[in-house]
């Protein structure tokens, strides 16, 4: 470990141990406390965030993708779709909303149920014209007024 750190310091880089943390990756018991004390840095678990990406979590679970879906939802809410034309809404969707999950998707494979949640939010924004209309739903032999 010392040899690796010496090579790093030989390149002219310095390590800021106040900002560093020791992360235990294996399940075996190792004296990581000894290393953390020797380098004067903190200890952490593998459930960390690195460059906005949550590491150590399961990307197949819906909870993993909640920050992205919430960001999309936060962007859609303040925009007044009644004040924009269909072309304006389409530009906002392509330029802003579809670019939000791109960074996550460059690292992790997105599950289909998360894609459906995102599409539902985007579709609702695109087709909402801000006018309250009575919508009738036909199905199962009856008509329901909303």
Image (cartoon, rainbow, N blue to C red):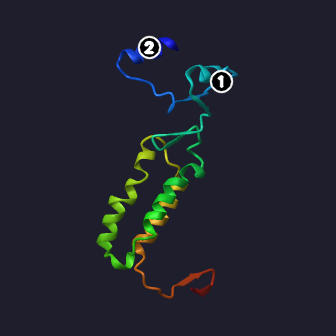
Residue 133 in view: yes
Question: Along the line of sight, which residue is nearer the eye, 144 or 140?
Answer: 144
The residue carrying mark 2 is 6
Above or below — where is 122 with respect to 142? Answer: above
Where residue 28 sits in the image (x, y, percent)?
69, 22
Q: Residue at x 51, y 59 (%)?
A: 70
Q: Residue at x 40, y 17 (%)?
A: 9
Q: Which mark is residue 62?
A: none
Above or below — where is 109 with respect to 14? Answer: below
Give the mark nearest the N terminus, 2 or 1: 2
* 74 lies left or right of 35: left
Question: Residue 56, located in which quarter of the rendered image?
Answer: top right
Question: Hey, which residue is sitting farthest right in the picture?
Answer: 29
Q: Which mark is residue 33?
A: 1
Q: How many marks?
A: 2
Q: Residue at x 42, y 76 (%)?
A: 128
Where residue 68 sits in the image (x, y, percent)?
49, 54
Question: Along the line of sight, which residue is nearer the eye, 77 or 60?
Answer: 77
Above or below — where is 27 with respect to 145? Answer: above
Q: Looking at the figure, which quarter contains the C terminus?
A: bottom right
Circle 2 Cα neighbour tier, 10 Å, few/some/many (<14 / 14–19 / ≥20)? few
* 88 lies left or right of 24: left
Where residue 11 sits in the image (x, y, percent)?
35, 17
* 109 lies left or right of 93: right
Label 1, secondary structure: give it.
helix
Question: Residue 30, located in which quarter of the rendered image?
Answer: top right
């Amino acid at each position: 470990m010392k040899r690796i750190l010496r090579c790093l310091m030989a390149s002219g880089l310095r390590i800021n141990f106040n900002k560093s943390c020791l992360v235990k990756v294996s399940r075996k018991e190792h004296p990581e406390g000894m290393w953390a004390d020797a380098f004067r840095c903190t200890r952490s678990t593998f459930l960390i965030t690195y460059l906005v990406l949550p590491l150590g979590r399961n990307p197949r679970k819906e909870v993993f993708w909640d920050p992205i879906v919430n960001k999309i939802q936060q962007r859609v809410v303040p925009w007044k779709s009644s004040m924009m034309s269909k072309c304006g809404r389409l530009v906002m969707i392509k330029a802003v909303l579809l670019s939000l999950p791109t960074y996550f998707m460059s690292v992790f494979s997105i599950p289909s149920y998360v894609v459906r949640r995102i599409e539902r939010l985007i579709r609702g924004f695109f087709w909402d014209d801000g006018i309250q209309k009575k919508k009738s739903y036909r199905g199962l032999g009856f008509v329901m007024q909303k």
